[in-house]
Amino acid sequence: MVEILFLLLPFAFYSGWKAARNKFNKNQKKQRELSDHFVKGINFLLSEEPDKALEVFLNYPDIDDYTAQTYQLLGNLFRNRGEVDRALRVHQNLIARPNIRQRQKHKAMLSLGQDFFEAGMLDRAESVFQELLNNENVGKNISKSLVCQSLRTIYEQTQEWEKAIETTKCFKKYQKRNTANKKNNDNALIAHYYCELANQALKKGKLHDVDSFLSKAKKAYKNSTRLMSLAGSIAYHQEKYQEALNHYLAAIKQDSRLLSALYEKMEDSALKVDAIPMLQNALFKLYKKKKDKAVFETLLILALKNKDSSDDINKLIDEVLLSEKLSAKSIYNSTEYFSEGLGKLGTEKELKLINTALGNYLKNKPNFICTHCGYKLNDFLWRCPACHHWDTIDRA
């Protein structure tokens, strides 16, 4: 409770100073009572008796703007500490005050909605935020873009993607500074939501709806790699393998993180249309351009599966092993390539030992990590399951 002490001490000093300054004023008694009241509350906090402290604070009949702001901060601090029930009591008490100013009431309602969200009461949180959004006077006191953002988070949790799209548009509308980067980020989110809707429609076999959602996603953000990979999966599902392969290649050229997720369908599509050389050539060009280790690993896997020991592959491996700082997985794939007799380096026994050791090293090692919160996972996801941010999953 030390943090709360530091929060409330300035108010106690303020109240004492104000009481002393107005000692000859007709409000002298009231100011002294206010000062004593908060000192009593602080004493309870120091004694680790927060509920008694709350009773003292919340039962005081008269509050001004300064007191209301202190209550607001106190409630937020409780929520940040995980004490959501106490945060709810503070903010609900503040809203119920008949003499509170509209500005403070709107701020308290925003905090109350956040309290409900943290408590998992999403329907109540949605109701509070919607009430704020529909109130024409709210924009004078709090940011409506923040309200829209809070609603969007709820709809992401409940997977109500159409509502998430609407609140993102609402967020864009009320943003004060709508820079190009912010626009792209908002549009990318909208494309994600349409892709989610397309996925749902695909599972239900509603292909007409799938096309409609993909068209809207493309209109929102045409450079969405998720849109490209989803279009590839739909083409693959429809047995249009060359079209699927083209979509997959377009996606990985823009974002090679998708290689591990798309590789099996890419290879299968290429096999179906006898386009393995075309796929290998595309990956060669991509590696030469970006020097991406994931592309190098995929080239080795492709060569191993198809028993391709061409001079181009051998030259590339020698070049990369000598000059590039590789991941353990890249080295593992390289040594496996040699151990299969496809290369010209070392003895088979030595390479098998290295291969086994590196294989053991890679066991249970996560493939991906969230760049925002550090959460580790084995499969690529568009949205982190821990912090719920989009497009933050990268290779570990």
Image (tube, rainbow, N blue to C red):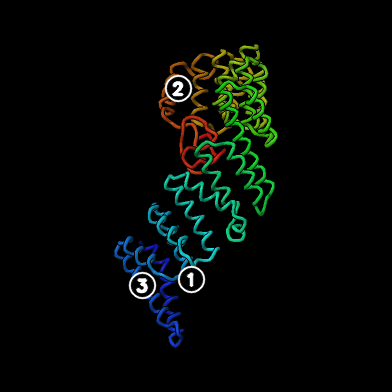
- Check disc 3 and give the amino acid type: Val
Quadrant position of residue 306:
top right
Q: Is residue 91 above or below residue 358?
A: below
Q: In this view, does 220 lie above or below 31?
A: above
Q: Nearer the viewer, mark 3 or mark 2?
A: 3
* Residue 291 is at least partly visible in this image: no
Q: Where is residue 267 drawn, in percent x and y?
A: 59, 17
Which residue is rendered at x = 41% and y = 66% of the image? Answer: 6
Q: Where is residue 375 drawn, in percent x and y?
A: 46, 39
Mark 2 or mark 1, which is nearer the start of the sequence? Answer: 1
Quadrant position of residue 71:
bottom left
Tag 1 secondary structure: loop
Q: Which of marks 1 and 3 is in front?
A: 1
Q: What distance separates the C-alpha of mark 1 from that of mark 2?
A: 72 Å
Query: Which residue is more in the foreground, 52 or 17?
Result: 52
Which residue is rendered at x = 67% and y = 19% of the image? Answer: 243
Report the quarter where the N terminus lies. Answer: bottom left
Q: Is there a contact, CB below 8 Å, between mark 3 and mark 2? A: no
Q: In this view, does 74 lie above or below 273?
A: below
Q: What distance separates the C-alpha of mark 1 from that of mark 3?
A: 17 Å
Residue, disc 2? 355
Which residue is rendered at x = 43% and y = 54% of the image? Answer: 80
Query: Which residue is more in the foreground, 310 or 109?
Result: 109
Residue, disc 1? 64
Tag 3 secondary structure: helix
Which circle marks residue 39 in the picture? 3
Q: Where is residue 44 drawn, in percent x and y?
A: 31, 66
Tag 2 secondary structure: helix
